[in-house]
Amino acid sequence: MTAGVFVLVVLGVLVGGLIAHVLVDFGVWAIVLRAFGPAFERGAAATTVAIRHLKGKKSGVLAFFVLLSTLGVSVSSCMLSSVISIMGGFGDDLRSKIIGNNAHIVVDRPAGTIEDGMTVARRIRRIDGVVGAMAYASGEVMISSQTNLSGVLLKGIDTRNVRKVLDLPRHLEEGKLRYLDHPEELLRVESDFDEFERTAGRLLPLAGEGGSRDEYRPPSLEEEPPSDLAQRLPDAAGLRPPVARAGPSGVDAGAAGTVAQIGRGPDADASARGLGASGRAAPQLGEPGRDQPPEEPEEPDPFLEPIRDEVLPGVIIGRELARNLRLHVADEVNIVSPLGDLGPTGPVPKSRPFRVAGVFYTGMYEFDSKYGYVTIPVAQSFLNMGNRVTGVEARVRDVERAEVQARAIRRVVDRRYRVRDWKELNRSLFTALALEKIAMFVALSVATIIAAFSIISTLLLMVIERGKEIAILKSIGTTDRGILNIFMLEGLLIGLVGSGAGILLGAVTCLVIKYQGVRLDPEVYYIDQLPVHMSLGEFGLVGLAAVGISLVATLYPSWAASQLRPVDGLRQD
């Protein structure tokens, strides 16, 4: 991005210089005279003299300063108009995201909840200009997964009317909105994680966390000899296989030390029938006897039991939150609310499992990392709100006239309720953006002020070089005010030509950025392209500022020219 912007700036300077050079050398002053001649009818003679001074033959130094002055005003105007347009693009992008993810009008109570939220929503829908309205219930909670946790604003929405109020369905990247109403369908949804990655990522040690390769590793069952395996098994009944020491004769194996399992050797048939070598019945393995304690019933191993899926309420979360918690659709999460029940030792937080029903992406980090959506009944139950709601949201047809519908809503709802439109809700943010744009305008205007010093130098050189002509004009009756007007017009014309070329170049630059695009890294800037918003009023303001600064810069040189005495001017020759 930096290289692209640098190339644009360099090209702008070169093109601006070329335009200024062409305009200065090919009679632009005559064109300006014809265009603005009616405005200078009273000072037609002064205007003619000023244009002849700029158009006529000049010394090399003076010609360079005229070109430099025009180029300075042109480049500064181009920079100012381009930056203001880009800042306007960022402001419009932020505004559209805020309006799309929030309602245009919000009805709530300054302290407390609304009991008749559904009734209020129905009344608001009947108002002319209102597209849709829905009640909502919200509260701050903690959401946790097996890897991380985060604070979230849990918001219960009316899934039947949410499409008319919010852009949430349009922003869904994974999952479906219907999963909130039908969470049982999530049991049939396969997560995007592979099963091996899901288990291996949690159970296997990370690289560098385990021991070195030279550490002791217990041998596997295939590597360990059967005799060592039998000795390591516990003596509990039913766990170690019965063994007999088989010697050379097959009767006493104490000396040989080899292992003979049941079912092998000469006593296999007797052992299979439960008889010992002497023909007497041998106690069965696991059968309680005098020398063996009774066996306790085995408890089922939870790791070997099949996982029983449970229908859990669904929750839709943002992309950044899903990335932070490493979640996908159909994954289980745990949500904790501080508004729990009263226990023996005080309030007990309420914890409940949920299942991810969808992942949305709005392009605004605050929403994608801090919002979770559920249905209104689930939010009311989890937040202990009963049948109450936090407020009612509405969307209007004309965003710019939302305050008109807000006044109409105030007339149909209880006076205890507070009605605010999107401008009032985000007043501090938009005020900060406006102040930032003004500050940037003032800061970049310094470049035009610097260019104005070049205009001062140019006009002072013009006074010195045209001293004889000034003396002749005064000798034939031109007043000091007439001389003052001539040099002020010269500075004004430099400002007009420079600002016009700069605004034209700035408009071309903005159009190139808008339609060709300057790509940005969305992981860093959370936007994939540099936005641009071109405003005719802002371009006109830039032109007026450049011309005004140029005009102010002409005051001292013009005054110095008007104070020149004819004798001093004629003495220079």
Image: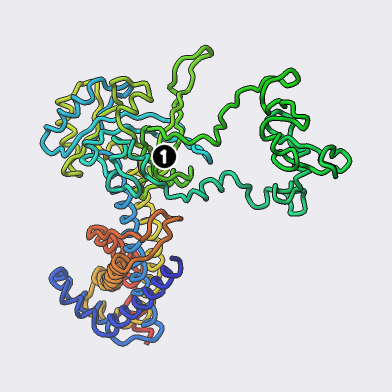
- Structural crowding at the residue carrying mark 1, measured as other residues with C-alpha within 10 Å and reported as few (<14), some (14–19) or many (≥20): some
Q: Which residue is the extreme one toward the right?
A: 255
User: What residue does disc 1 label?
Assistant: 370
Q: Residue 318, position in %: x, y?
A: 39, 44
- Horizontal relation, residue 450 to residue 417: left or right: right
Observer-nearest of 303 and 397: 303
- x 34%, y 66%: residue: 517
Q: Is residue 78 visible?
A: yes
Note whether 4 is above or below 214 in the view shown.
Answer: below
Q: What's the residue at 44%, 17% (across, down)?
A: 341
Residue type marked 1: Lys
Instruction: Give the residue displayed 72% in from the left and 42% down from the top.
Output: 264
Q: Nearer the viewer, residue 60 or 18?
A: 18
* x, y percent for residue 150: 48, 37
Q: Residue furthest front?
A: 279
Q: Position of residue 473 (x, y in %)?
A: 25, 79
Of residue 229 and residue 324, the one placed in the foreground of this image is 229
Residue 480 shows up from this direction: no
